[in-house]
Each structure stands twice: as C-alpha cells, then as structure tokens.
Amino acid sequence: MKRIEIDPNDLNVDIIRIWGQQYFLLTAGEHKPGKFNTMTVAWGSLGVMWGKPFAQAVVRPSRYTHGFMDSGDTFTLSAFPPEHSDALMLLGTRSGRDGDKIKESGLTPIDSQNVAAPGFNEAELILECRKIYRDEMKPGLFLDPKTEGNYNGSDYHTIYFGEIVAVSGVEKYKS
C-alpha cells in the first residue's frame, strides 16, 4: 500500500465512521520484540487541544496495552481497509499476555518515522502521537447515568491525549 506523508493540519477523516465502524489499532511501546503491544480501539476522538492536533484514546487498566501506554511517551493509531477486519477482531479480543497475537493476526509492524511505537505495513492511515496528557475516569463524574453501565462498577478507562506529530496515509486522507 502506498502511503504518503500528510501534514496533520491537512488530515481529512470521517471521525464518526473511523472510530465507530472502521476502528483503530492502538500500539504502544518500542518496536523491539516483546517491548510493545497493540489492541483494537473503537472509543476515542481526534481534534485540536491546546492549539495542537491531537488524538484521544482510552484504555482499561486490565488491558495488557495499558502498561505500555503508561511506561512510554508515544503511541500510534493505525486504520486499515475492510479486508483486515478479521485481524482487528483478533487483536481486540486476545491478550498479548497470552502469546504472539500480532504474529497470529498476519499484520506486519513497521518503524514509525517520529515515535518509538510502531505502525503497521497494511494500514491505510497511521497517526504517530506523543503523549501530552493522562487522566483516569472517575465514577462520580459521569453526567449521563447510562454511561456508568459500561463499567459495572470497575475497570474505568485511563484517558490519553497524544499530540499528532506525524501522519502517513493513502491519498483519501489528505485534504
């Protein structure tokens, strides 16, 4: 797949579709054997925060990727064409604690241009992010009582903001 470099300010994404139907792989750690993990994510946002293009991702503390997010300074979000939906399903339902799920998925991790966390060769869009904020969701702060039902009283997400420092993608993502 031919990806081009895209200035973050020229990124053109259907935000609701990419998060709600296409999903991302969130990858954290260093591109070295055993030093990174990835997971499929469907909750997050893209936008501008503190004058910087940013991506927000959330990870439950029980997820293996959570430790990689906390210990490193960077992460990537990679979006894929529909033919990789089986790989995304596998990477979202299996834990990296239990074996090499990335190898099993058939996807190929690649070096990023500006961050330690890898992207994936098969991705049609890769957002390289440097963490700029972290917080934990707090049960007493939900304004919609229905939201609390996503948690069953425990395992509240950690919220991560990452400045988007580099983007590579296929032409359709460039405005």
Image (cartoon, rainbow, N blue to C red):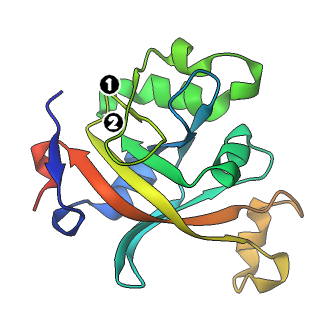
- The answer to whether residue 79 is left or right of residue 33 is left
Q: Quadrant of the C terminus?
A: bottom left
Please state which amino acid type lies under the numbered disc 1.
Glu
Where does the image place residue 45, in percent across and percent down from the top left?
Answer: 45, 66
Image quadrant where residue 29 sits: top right
Which residue is located at x 12 percent, y 56 percent? Answer: 174
Mark carried by residue 83? 1
Q: Is residue 28 visible?
A: yes
Instruction: Tell us which disc is closer to us: 2 or 1.
Output: 2
Residue shown at 63% from the left, 16% from the top: 100
- The image position of residue 140, as x and y in percent, is 84, 83
Task: Give SS at disc 1.
Answer: helix
Q: What amino acid type should be assigned to the residue bearing mark 2? A: Phe
Q: Residue furthest right?
A: 153
* Figure check: 90 above or below 164: above
Check the image and report above or below for 141 versus 134. Answer: below
Of the 4 image quadrants, the one containing the N terminus is top left
* Residue 65: numbered disc: none
